[in-house]
Amino acid sequence: MKIERVLIEEDQIQAKLAEMGAAISRDYEGKNLLVVGVLKGAFMVMADLARNIDIPVEFDFMAVSSYGSATKTSGVVRILKDLDTEIAGRHVLIVEDIIDSGLTLHYLIRNLGVRGPESLELAALLVKDGIERPPLDIRYTGFHIPPEFVVGYGLDYQGLLRNLPYIGVMAEDGEED
Ligand code: IMP
Ligand code: MG
């Protein structure tokens, strides 16, 4: 498993999360904000984004698994861990690592939407361009990237490489040693 090239450097990610955190802090000033991270991929974004939010805020996590192959999701989502928090009347911001087919988020929005939150918005560090997906209104976007399979900064290939501090593109199978 080799990284062919770095797509987004560590300092670019950190600078972007500082901007996103500032925007979130402005927009939710005086509100009752609950930030919901989607495990596992979003754990790193959550940790670094959290340090850039300077208003009172609570955090919770959901764990979902999308059935599919190693690199493609099927759109069938299973909740492995639900929220600990009731979200009725709360301002909820869902944080995702990456939006590919959008099916996971589409499912989550419907699932959380019926619980009666005061507002429900989305933040995603990465959005893949050139993908057909159900319409999603993403309030905070980090980077648009080409429709390639990427790893690092929370994103895995077969469970590995989440610990890289940058986002990279893996070498094709044939190029591995
Ligand atoms: P969806 O296709 O938008 O539903 O994406 C579902 C999940 O697949 C994301 O939350 C990621 O965990 C994972 N995923 C999508 N694209 C990539 C990728 O390029 N690298 C690693 N994981 C990905
Ligand atoms: Mg994954």
Image (spheres, grey):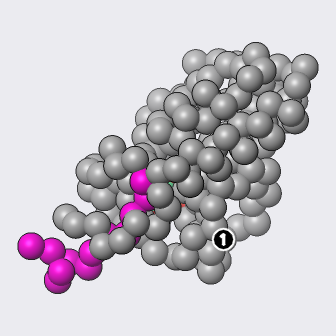
Secondary structure, mark 1, is: loop
Residue at (78, 21) in percent of width and height:
55
Q: Residues in magenta?
A: 166-177
Q: Quadrant of residue 18?
A: top right
107 is higher (above) or lower (below) than 176: above
Q: Residue furthest front?
A: 11
Residue at (55, 65) in percent of width and height:
100
Q: Residue furthest right?
A: 30
Q: Is residue 170 found inside the magenta-colored segment of the image?
A: yes
Residue at (75, 60) in percent of width and height:
136
Count every numbered label the image shows and give the total.
1
Q: Is mark 1 within 8 Å of ligand 1?
A: yes
Q: Please name the residue that numbered disc 1 is placed on.
A: 133
Picture coordinates of residue 155, whole percent (x, y): 41, 52
In the rendered image, which quarter contains the N terminus? bottom left
Q: Is residue 33 visible?
A: yes
Picture coordinates of residue 134, whole percent (x, y): 70, 67
Residue at (28, 66) in percent of width and height:
3
Q: Is residue 87 visible?
A: no
Q: Is residue 81 found inside the magenta-colored segment of the image?
A: no
Residue closest to the eye, 41 or 14: 14
Picture coordinates of residue 23, whole percent (x, y): 80, 40
Q: Amino acid at mark 1?
A: Arg
117 is higher (above) or lower (below) than 23: above
